[in-house]
Image (cartoon, grey):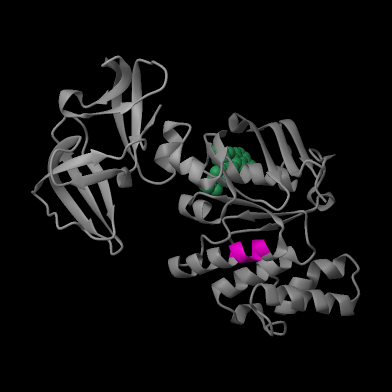
Amino acid sequence: MAAHDGTLVELDDVRKEFGDVVAVKGIDFDIRQGEFFTLVGPSGCGKTTTLRMISGFERPTEGRVRIDGREMTSFPPEARDTNLVFQHLSLFPHMSVGENVGYGLKKAGVDADERDERVREYLDLVDLGGYADRDPADLSGGQQQRVALARALVNEPAVLLLDEPLSSLDRKLRKRMQVELRQIHEQTQGSFFYVTHDQEVAMTLSDRIAVMNEGRIEQIGPPEKIYRDPATEFVADFIGDTNLFDGEVIDRDGDRVVRVGGPDGFVVPVDGARGDVTVSVRPEDFTLVPEGGDFTGEVTERYFQGDRTNFVIDPDFDAEAVQIVIQGREGGVDTGERVAVDVVDGAPVVF
Ligand SMILES: Nc1ncnc2c1ncn2[C@@H]1O[C@H](COP(=O)(O)OP(=O)(O)OP(=O)(O)O)[C@@H](O)[C@H]1O
């Protein structure tokens, strides 16, 4: 049951110090009932510490954690309606798959018949129906991770906490598990809090993402919003690929615009007037055009990647090389060729 406004977990100005290290510098966010919420950021930014403060394994130095409307800041893990799945598998080796999944129910005093039924139901959910009597050691890494998921889900916690649960799997399996995790989330309609440094996983799975950097949250929002309208330079650079340029705000025909690369460069519209700014343009927001274009340059590198081709272009204005991605057909352009480039209207973001 969520608090009446749909908020299930609330972090209120939470800070965590380990001696001189400030791992989390006063963060606020809410996880809503039924939401797949992901905390993403580079290694060491404070993600696991945040998760451990929600689970109760770590106590905040300052601030509050509420779960389902109840103050939980100082409560131990067993008093909280949360379960945890880690990157490193933690199945009990001396128990069968079914016993692993039913362990928490047994501890809670659920009788054997109901336990068997629930274990069966949750093994079916993770697509391991019929595996109850197997030894976990005989399963593949992906199957073991699914058992760990079933074990964490079976007692229907208010929030499932997932700490990089897919990062030990190979790329193909990780992709498949992403899809399955999303399906499991939809079927259980549970509230999931997922921690990862992998922005691609975050984008694929999440209803909302919080981007963390050096102990602070830089932006919270749905994946599309974070990608298309990043709040900071860090977010633009960390989520997806981007080209960052220095720009200057100038008057042009009575309008304020940002000029990138001087007279040979390009301009983008801007709201409000500021001095020096940074302009972010995603690789797919440049297009190669037959002639004219917002600027010109020379193709210095070209990487064919199947569904897309990446070009590196040395522009005729003074800036670092520009990365361009053309989806689908490669456009028949080769290294050494001169090209004209357009900037997609409305796509660049100015900081
Ligand atoms: N128990 C601890 N004692 C001292 N410092 C700690 C402790 N736990 C975490 N830290 C420090 O706090 C900071 C944040 O660590 P945390 O594990 O939360 O980051 P993370 O974003 O989860 O990183 P990763 O993606 O590498 O797991 C780091 O500088 C880390 O060294």
Residue 184: in magenta span: yes
Q: Quadrant of ligand 1?
A: top right
In the rendered structure, which segment of residues is drawn in magenta?
A: 181-186
Quadrant of image for the C terminus: top left
Q: Residue placed at 50% from the left, 41% from the top? A: 225
Tell me: residue 221, above or below residue 148.
above
Q: Going by the image, does 240 lie left or right of 257?
A: right
Q: Position of residue 273 (x, y in %)?
A: 39, 15
Tell me: residue 7, above or below residue 188.
above
Residue 107: which quarter of the image? bottom right
Toward the front, the furthest residue is 253
Q: Position of residue 12 (x, y in %)?
A: 71, 32
Q: Residue placed at 19% from the left, 29% from the top? A: 265
Residue 168: in magenta span: no
Do we see residue 118 in this rendering? yes
Q: Going by the image, does 267 lie left or right of 153?
A: left
